[in-house]
Amino acid sequence: MAMNMDLIKDLYVNVASFEKMHKLRLLDLYSHPYTRGVNNLDLPPMHKLRLLDLYSHSYTRGVNKLHLPPGFVFLPEALKYLRWDFYPLTSLPSRFSSENLVELHMPDSRLEQLWNKGVQINLGSIKRIDLSYSEHLADVSALIESPNLERIRLGGCKSLVQLPSPFQNLAKLTSLNLNRCSNLKILPEMPGNLELLVLYQTAIEELPSSIWSLEKLQFLGLAICEELKNLPSSTCRLYSLPDLHLYRCRSLESLPVELPSELKELYLSDCESLGSLPAQLPSGLKKLELRNCKSLGSLPVELPSGLEYLDLSGCESLGSLPAQLPSGLKKLELRKCKSLGSLPVELPSGLEYLDLSDCESLGSLPVELPSGLKTLQLRSCKSLGSLPKLPWLLGLFDAHGCTSLETVSSPMRTAPIQGRDQYVNHSEKFEELLFMNCVKLDQSAQSNIMADAQLRVMRIATASRLLNKPSTINIVCPGNEIPKWMRYQSEGCSINIKLPPHWFRLGFLGYALCIVVAFNNYTPPDIDNYSYFGCETHHKTNNSHEVCWEALRISLPAILINSDHVFVWYFCPKFVRLESAINRQDWVKASEASFDFKLYQNIIQTPKEGNLFDPSTVRVKRCGVSLLYAQEIEKLLGGIDEDEVMEPKQTVEEEDIIIKTKRQRDESELSGSGTASFKEEYNDQLRPQSSKRKINIM
């Protein structure tokens, strides 16, 4: 029998109703979240009932859904499964014969102990007990009378101070959860078959030595044990443990010489007293987190060669790294390592992510960075004076606030095809190169950044066309001039251009956009809002038809800015959803275009004119636009071998546009020499400058 209690206020049970229910085996009274539950429930004798489930959703924790009448003493002796959320009494009924009970679930109960002292109990059949978040529970000594127990859940039992000492006699116990038993200080020796032991947020100061010998243990959770000072020093036999959670053990000063041999992940973040690591870490370790270990002064000379992830962020006392980092390292986080003065001469070749933000003492980077590096964070590295050549696959580069940075190496001219296959296969097509507030960058450095920007814009444009997916790039650096490679330039915040005939020909990749912004004590908005640049573009035909849309939004960083900066980004209108096919045809036939750049502040929803920046604080001084074509790659690349480039490919959309354009010509043109002239002119635009070379438009 099952009953939804959501819409029931009071339930009074007539004993006579159950007298003839000789075959009743299950009574399930349940309620869902946010319901009042039952104010009065009086259970009649149901001697053959085997499953009693009085369930309340976990969202209602702390609210008694079921209330018993005074003098309640009955629970069916045939019960095998008992679940009673928010059980309201301090102990189980003394007359309850528990010899058949296999599972007992009473989360959020008012239990202080399972049975009153002196009551004879038989728990020989019970295998699972869940008393989690029974905040008044202080005595669980009855558990040692349960030789067949396999799983115990006592998480959140705040009044529990210790477990009974013969606990190791529970030979079949495989899972013990003591999470958030915040006053638990003493652990007895543990049974040898444990596979899971959770001790998060307990008050234990040391572990029994038997824990280090649990050969079947697969999970050991010791995080946020802020009183734990050391781990067992005995020989470690944790042969099945893949990861060890010790983060926020603030009193932990050292680790034993021997750690679990099969360890793959070790979490030690916020262990503020930890001064050193063992000389030899497990050889199979893949992930090591040491974030905010403020007392850690050094690392072992040799780290496991297979280590893939190393997080040392906030290790303020760490002055250096090992001369040779693991060859398999892919992600290295060193944010806020304020004492770190240098990096190894050579970084691992497979490194993809490197975060050095707020490393205030870091004076230089290696001469050559890994070619596959995709993310490089250098925000507020205030002692960094120069940059090497940036890897061409770099997708995110942030050097905000590198106030000593003066020089940047020139880009590689072969960059647009270098790493082409890896780049195309890389799922993320969003790039940022940010030099905001790098106030000491010299003119040569700014020129190098803009030259690099041209190559990167061209590469992401060709990749966008190849993948037929939108891609964006945003490049920012100090400066007050539009780069020379921007074909159309204008003073102020808008620009109008005349489009060349057949401008949307095969190989059109989109627009490169650029603005020079004057910042005068710009301060970021509050955390609930954000500011950004927007660009509205209008395309007009000779028949005065007009198509317009917002080209792109570039958000502003939440930092103080007080100088002119150049912004460059890429936009492809191909991926804009126009209202109709007519609008798209009008856009393709446009003869002129205008671009209007605006700066919005404190935007939560739709931008309005009233949200524009105060011009005295932020102002667009100049702007520029370039139309990008696949053929321009050849001009940028000199001396590329024929084998390194590919034939241009025509997309279905472009074929449709060509056909539509040709059909729109009058019949006389289509039947005469006009068609041939059109084809010849179109093919001339596609033909490579040198017949001996093929163009790669990716």
Image (spheres, rainbow, N blue to C red):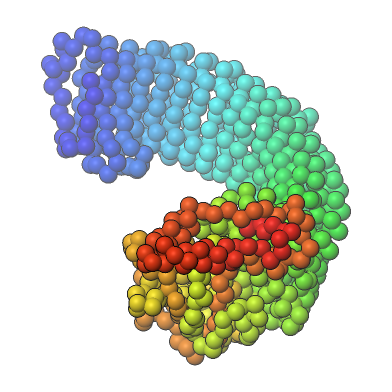
Q: Residue at x 47, y 18 (%)?
A: 127
**Relative to 58, does residue 139 appear above or below in the rendering?**
above
Residue 241, given in percent of the width and then of the height, sits at: 67, 31
Residue situated in front as seen by the camera: 606 or 528: 606
Q: Report whether 563 appears left or right of 282.
A: left
Residue 587, given in percent of the width and then of the height, sits at: 41, 69
Q: Is residue 559 visible?
A: no
Q: Residue at x 22, y 16 (%)?
A: 45
Residue 86, given in percent of the width and then of the height, sits at: 33, 35
Q: Is residue 668 visible?
A: yes
Q: Residue at x 55, y 52 (%)?
A: 467
Q: Report whether 249 appears left or right of 115.
A: right
| Outermost residue toward the bottom in this view | 616
Q: Residue at x 84, y 56 (%)?
A: 346
**Relative to 120, does residue 531 appear above or below in the rendering?**
below
Residue situated in front as seen by the camera: 651 or 198: 651
Residue 285, given in percent of the width and then of the height, sits at: 74, 39
Please state, as top left, top right, bottom left or bottom right, where the N terminus lies in the image: top left
Q: Report whether 583 appears left or right of 439.
A: left
**Relative to 436, does residue 153 appear above or below in the rendering?**
above
Residue situated in front as seen by the camera: 79 or 602: 602
Please state, as top left, top right, bottom left or bottom right, where the C terminus lies in the image: bottom right
**Relative to 691, does residue 554 appear above or below in the rendering?**
below
Q: Splitting the image into 4 quarters, where does residue 446 fall? A: bottom right
